[in-house]
Amino acid sequence: MALWRKARPEQAEVVEAEPAEVREQVLRARGEGDADTEQALTGSWQVRLQQLLRADPSLAGELRRVLDEVLTPALQPADQDRIGSLVMKATASGHGRVYQSGRDQTIHER
């Protein structure tokens, strides 16, 4: 993956082989109805990409290109419709609280 080659060249060879392998594992888990394994596999890659962007925010454009041109087209059409972006910002002052969620959220307060 050219993105990894730019950011972490020492890991590029290993990382280039992993997406195809992980994709097969995800598809197998999906086919078996194993949502937990599917979520764990995709979650681990989300964390890796987040770490990559934190280390070098200038890679955001290249990552967006990979998502748009490589990863999203590989999804089933129904899954492609779920792809989007979400930007949330919040500020609280004093004793104010902010709750944000890109999905489900449960808050228990006393």
Image (tube, helix red, strand yellow):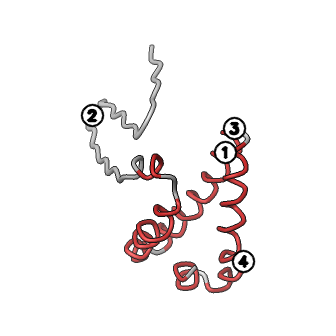
Which image quarter holds the N terminus?
A: bottom right
Q: Are marks 2 and 4 in contact (CB under 8 Å)?
A: no
Mark 3, residue position: 33
The amino acid beneath tag 2 is Gly
Q: Secondary structure at mark 2?
A: loop
Q: Earlier in the sequence, mark 3 or mark 4?
A: 4
Q: Are marks 1 and 4 in contact (CB under 8 Å)?
A: no
Q: Secondary structure at mark 1?
A: helix
Circle on res. 94: 2
Q: CA distance from mark 3 to mark 2?
A: 47 Å
The amino acid beneath tag 3 is Gly
Mark 4, residue position: 14
Nearer to us in this view, 6 or 99: 6
Mark 3 or 4: in front is: 3
Which residue is drawn at the image coordinates 63% and 45% (left, top)?
A: 39
Which residue is drawn at the image coordinates 26% and 38% (left, top)?
A: 93
The amino acid beneath tag 4 is Val
